[in-house]
Amino acid sequence: MSLKELLCSIWRFFLKLYFGYLRRMNEVSQTHGVNYILDERLHPLERLVWVVIVISAFCGAISIGSNQLGRYNANPTVISLERDYHDWNGTMPAVTFCYVDRLSPEAVEVFLETKWNITPSHKEYPFFSRFIESVSNISVMNLQAFDEFAFDEQLRSADFLEITKAAFDEFAFDEQLRSADFLEITKAVVPIFEQYISNFDRTAQLDAVPIVTEKGLCYSVNSPLTPIFSVANRKPHQENEIPVREPLSCKYTKNQCFLKIDVYGFRLSSVFVHSPFEIPLGDTQAPSLEPTDEITATYRIIETTADDSVRELSVSQRNCLFYDEKIRRLPSYSLNLCTMECRARAALNACGCKPFFYPFVQGPDCNVEGIFCLNRLSWPERTKGTCDCPKPCLDLLYIPNSYKVESWDVGEEGIPFAQKSTFRLEILPAKMRNRREVLFTFEDLLVSLGAATSLFIGISFYNMLHGLLLHFELVIEIIQWCRGRRS
């Protein structure tokens, strides 16, 4: 047998086998138009027309099915408005406040003499004092203050966080207090940092926790993220090490939802009101408090909730992340936390170190040379627009509604009393909120695909399974035929 005859016999066998397969499949599925293609009594041209029609129907079904699948993968969610506000609970915001005047002269003298043996009579005392002041007031917005210290040999290995804590606490180098908790020292020993926090719920205990932020060393109230930025623990947290603590919530119909912070002393502070699941960035604007100011502010809350079915979607489908979801080894997720992690990674890639603002990111902290390197490379401006951080699925946005400032300064000749700054915020009852819902579920996708195949081809899910079974039988027959030819 010649090669041409062999190829012709193989071609005739496959045609016979495939047409037999189509007849068997059509007996069960009754696919539109296939019976006309298989009818040998019709003219070949008519059968060819039916082939074109059937192929076009298959193409139409595939096109509509792919469009529906693309819709399900790209954007199956919708944001709707809820107005049934009578039983809602309002989540109280977190308040982060940072002292502007962060130096204790006594602490500076003790630290310089202990660390570098420099006393006030030393000729370089002003130079080192400026360094201590720069470290105490460090933030992502003033890295240029360290340019003059970049090439000093004694300052190259200085620990910024150690200096910051020492400048805050005049008792930091007492042998009996070395192992004491920094927060306890701040609250019990240093009167300049005495704070009193009250709220609508007398049974709820809220503390001002010292944390490290891009603004430097600050205090945070009612924030579940404080363990991540705690001054007491500079080691990166593991995923299961973060204690889950819900922020304070308030029943609108039962309480006047307020939070009041009294700060005693003469030091100025900046106050940030933000979501409990966020941390303010270094470029966030905030009002400042004078030593005798009393600020009364009201805030409107714009809340975005999510249906339980949203969590079943992939991140690429919903384009958002929940707070308890993990990406990039973050212990928790928030938009600002993701941005800070991105900035820290950029600093590590650029200069081999990161500022001590990011204790949750593994890597060495920058010394003076590292800060000088970051400032020379215009960090973190270079990271703007490069951080790919999804939005949170659950969001809390606090919008100022009213803001009233009163000053109770009595002057130098007035009656002496303990001066304090007071910040009182109140959350107004919300009457509507946003809600993420799944508009196009997986069940809707199945129904849509089934309708498209039924409309264009006229087959059901059962017919598809039977077709797959016949394809499997076809493959087996081909394998058996090939084995028979070899033998």
Image: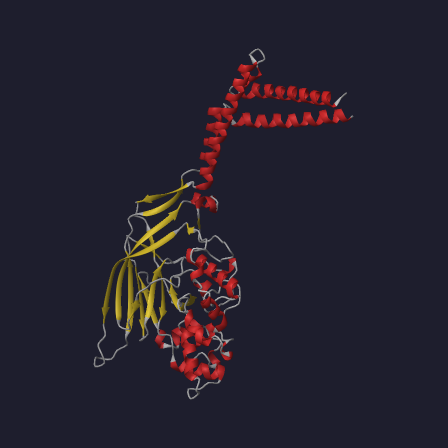
- Residue at the limit of the structure toward the right, as seen here: 487
- Residue at the limit of the structure toward the bottom, as seen here: 121
Which residue corresponds to the image point at 39% horizontal and 64% vertical from the top-left?
282
Residue 13 located left or right of residue 445: right
Is residue 367 among the parts visible in the rendering? no
Residue 68 in picture, x, y percent from top left: 45, 34
Which residue corresponds to the image point at 45% horizontal and 41% vertical from the top-left?
74
Residue 71 located left or right of residue 363: left
* The quarter of the displayed image where residue 6 is located: top right
Which image quarter is the C terminus in? top right
Which residue corresponds to the image point at 42% horizontal and 51% vertical from the top-left?
391
Residue 415 located left or right of residue 95: left
Which image quarter is the N terminus in? top right
Toward the viewer: 185 or 201?
A: 185
- Residue at the limit of the structure toward the top, as seen here: 41
Which residue corresponds to the image point at 52% horizontal and 21% vertical from the top-left?
52
- 402 shown above or below 457: below
- 324 shown above or below 35: below
* The quarter of the displayed image where residue 95 is located: bottom left
Residue 322 in picture, x, y percent from top left: 44, 51
Picture mark count: 0
- 149 shown above or below 399: below
Is residue 152 among the parts visible in the rendering? yes
